[in-house]
Amino acid sequence: AVVLTAFTLLPFLIFCIMAAPQVNPANLVQVDWDTVQWGKFLNCIFWNINYWDSASTLAGEVQNPRVNFPRGVLITLLIVVISYLGPLLAGVGIDANRNNWKEGYLGVLAYRVGGRFLGLWVVAAAAISNIGQFEAEMSSDAYQLQGMAERGMLPSVLSHKSKYGSPPFALFLSSLGVLLQLSSSFSEIVELLNFLYCLAQLLEFAAFVRLRVVAPDLPRPFKVPLGVWGLSAMLFLPYVFIVIIMSMASLHTLCVTAVVLVAGPLLYWLLEQARVRKWIEFNELKYFMPTTGEHQSYRQWDAQRELDQEEEDEDIFDSNSCTRADSTTTLLLRDSDNVNSQ
């Protein structure tokens, strides 16, 4: 991963260094406001810098997430901003003719500045970067489906792991969503994804604040060091930007979203019928949501999680001779006022 990251970032760094002497500062302040397509512009920016919450689905693979997650997000944010602004400022500084800026034009500028080798390197780095983004998105989607299946919210078949530890059926289901969008243009896909993502973000923000209110003592791998009002203030600007993005949606996006919103409850009802009537096998439902009136404290037992992980590793390396033991330890222990000792 480190080698691939270096391979994809180095050509753009070299391009910026070699292009610096040719940059015309006057090009950087030329803006034709009348020709700006604000809907596509803001949607592309939003699409390029969103999906940070997808990293949470891989939290189980990270050691000490309380420390490493904030550090990783901060470092990644700086790399993303620099990797976008640097090459674009260098490219526009060389050529500000907007008619020349088509898909792949950075490769043309790299060829002009650094020769054939740098131009090919930029194109190859862009291709590998796209593949990496696709793999990351597929992985996060698949792990979300796997996690929901493990907790009994989806059929248990989606929680199945291959000998490599990956969820093949969840990956297959995620790939179907990609195939359904092949007939749409890039701008249509970006706008649709952004609109659906905005709806999901509104729900995540609401759940984020509500959980802080009703379950302040719930164990968290990482906790934002702010109170309820501080969290609300922190989320105000994201809320405003999300509303702006959603207000620019086309009729096509609204129609597709309406179909998704109608299909969601129907699919949920169908899954519940399948669970009750035992049409499909489900794991035991593991879901807990404390109510506002509950003031007990909660803590999670890491011992059980480590035991389950060890058993899963044994199953992966020797699936023929190892079987999973039934779990006898409770994952979540509620300490009530009536219990004085554990």
Image (spheres, helix red, strand yellow):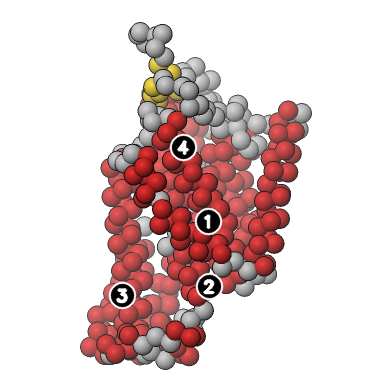
Q: Amino acid at mark 1?
A: Cys
Label whose residue precedes the other's in the sequence (1 or 4): 1
Mark 3 residue crowding within 10 angstroms, few (<14) / some (14–19) / many (20+): some
Label 1 to label 2, Cα distance in Å?
Answer: 15 Å
Q: Which residue is mark 2?
A: 39
Q: Residue at x 60, y 63 (%)?
A: 192
| Residue 161 falls in image quadrant | top right
Q: Amino acid at mark 4?
A: Arg
Which percent across, then down, holds residue 43? Answer: 50, 68
Which percent across, then down, holds residue 159? Answer: 58, 38
Q: Residue at x 45, y 30 (%)?
A: 214
Label 3 to label 4, Cα distance in Å?
Answer: 39 Å
Mark 4 residue crowding within 10 angstroms, few (<14) / some (14–19) / many (20+): some
Label whose residue precedes the other's in the sequence (3 or 1): 3
| In the image: residue 234, left or right of residue 179 | left
Q: Which residue is mark 1?
A: 198
Q: Secondary structure at mark 2?
A: helix
